[in-house]
Image: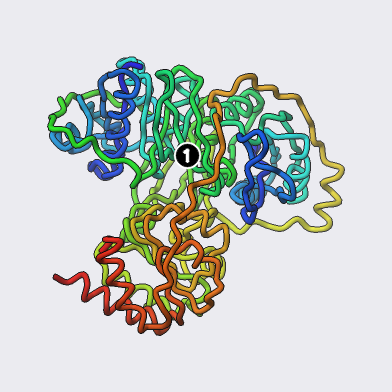
Amino acid sequence: MGSVLVVLEVRGGKVRPASMEALGAARTAAELTGGGTVTALATDAAEVDASALGAAGADQVLVANTEQHSSDGAAATAARVAREIGAGAVFLTATIRGRDLLGRIAALLNTGFVPDCIELGAEGGKLHFVRPVFAGKALIRVRINGPVAVASFRPNFFRGAGRSATAAIQKTTAEPGKAVVTGLSGERKGRPDVAEATKIISGGRGMGGPENWHLIEAVADAVPGMATGASRAVVDAGWRPHEEQVGQTGKTVSPELYIAAGISGAIQHLAGMSTSKVIVAINKDKEAPIFQHATYGVVGDVHQVLPKLADELKKASSP
Amino acid sequence: MDVIVCVKRVPSTTTRVVIGGDRKSIDPTGVEFLLNPYDEFAVEEALKQRDAAGGGTVTAVSFGTAEAQKELRTVLAMGADAALLLQSAQAPLCDGATTARALADAIRGRKFDLLFFGKQAVDMDQHGVGPAVATLLGVPCISEVVHLEVKDGKVTAHREVEGAHEIVEAPLPCAVTAQKGLNEPRYATLKGIMAAKKKPLDVVDASVGEPLVEIVEMKMPPPRAAGKMVGEGPEAVPALVQLLKHEAKVL
């Protein structure tokens, strides 16, 4: 197949962790198709760690010379580098940045793209990708008929290659773009975003009202790195902001731990979180559909169960 | 201000998916189809921008089956001026790159200041059609937009990223993909529905040939292992935390 290009996710001059997983997937793809090199590309200027990127799977790292992210510029840089190195595949992270670039890079390379892969394989030397559709209600296995396989990989499904290798770092030129990022606003500090967190507690209508959200916050405070999410009903009622919504018209998440508090389990919510590794359901209605999808279920009133859960989690987290 | 908005007919998000006999698509029996929810935000923004500019047209374009005329009529009833259906039996499960080619071929040569899309269609969840169409047309694209200002030939948009909003600027003509939060979509009024019947809806054949991405099979996700009811009320919590720590090992 030749070499694989991995477009690293860079924000604020730092490489985001999901990039390491895409590098691991690239290494696997290279091996499945008869060998080849893996090139990592930072389309914006970034601090890069040659040993960490090498260990994850990169043979070489190219770092572009722009501080200001432009989506069309970054896509043009990636497509140019893909042509220069004769890439047979271009891999990205299935994150907001990756989603933004995926279709553009495929369009520039005159090929097809596959978003949000959760499995990677090969048949007859050709890569196959498995990805969820209908927000995870079904899966499709696909292959790309175009000249280059452009794909993104969902966080928490792949791992860095874990090699002992150091990547060679080189500079490259960034292509200019028309749409430019001029700044950030409303930065939410303190808690990770649901789309990136490995642990999430989400509240639903069973929480009773926005004034009870401190119960959710207390549980999240008890576990380092836990994000807070919400069901669609709660977001539509204006109790919580849309960026917290988990489900088919919100964010699709796959954390290690997902706690659903006062969420009945509407099909559109289940679609967004059913690939979580461990699901805990807390609901006073023991017939709630969420229990059929839960690893562990507790029947009870969230007003009583959540404070106790916050206490016990705090105890469990402290050494 | 001339605006084009691309829309898709999709199964409702309450659909229980059943795999069809071809093992490559869903069984449409009993499935309710409607306008893609994210496209409602795109249509609303298209109408708002046309009206704010004090004139111009909104044209809705869909790559879909003959049945997608219903969704295009919905967009006309909301207030769009004209609609174009690129009719293809292959459209519903077509990959994003092939869909983007069909849309870009139809839009190329038409005059527009803004080009709107929903940020994703809730059936194939590709997120890439808007950015790909814009790339094929050579215009900038800002994706997953929650706030938009258009002034002096320039677009300033806020897009949702993990943990913040990114502020992006681009010149017109520009493409935008709409995220929930951008606006509150209007409902079609009875008057709008009546008026929509007289608005132009053109149908052209859009055969796309071999798709760029081929579906080998569609399958249901593996079932989850049966869960455990830990107990009732706060008394069950210590046991739950022990299970999370020692059995599931996620703490």
What amino acid is labelled 1 in the image?
A: Arg
Residue A219: where, in percent of width, then height?
32, 73
Classed neighbour count for the residue bearing mark 1: other residues with Cα under 10 Å, few (<14), some (14–19), many (≥20): many
Note whether B41 is above or below B202 in the view shown. below
Residue B8: where, in percent of width, then height?
66, 41
Image quadrant containing the N terminus of chain A: top left
Note whether A272 is above or below A168 in the view shown. below
Residue B172 shows up from this direction: no
At mark 1, the secondary structure is strand
Q: Identify which residue is drawn at 61% across, 34% down.
A: B24
> For this view, does B159 lie left or right of residue B242?
right
Residue A244 shows up from this direction: yes
Q: Quadrant of residue A30?
A: top left
Note whether B101 is above or below A295 in the view shown. above
> For this view, does B30 lie left or right of residue A101?
right
Residue A209: where, in percent of width, then height?
49, 78
Q: How is the image coloured?
A: rainbow
Q: Identify which residue is drawn at 63% across, 56% down.
A: B14
Image quadrant containing the C terminus of chain A: bottom left
- Which chain contains the residue that carries disc 1? A
Where does label 1 land, which residue? Answer: A131
Note whether A179 is above or below A229 in the view shown. above
Residue A234: where, in percent of width, then height?
52, 69
Viewer-proximal residue, B95 or B249?
A: B249
Q: Identify which residue is drawn at 27% across, 41% down.
A: A159
> For this view, does B131 lie left or right of residue B73?
left
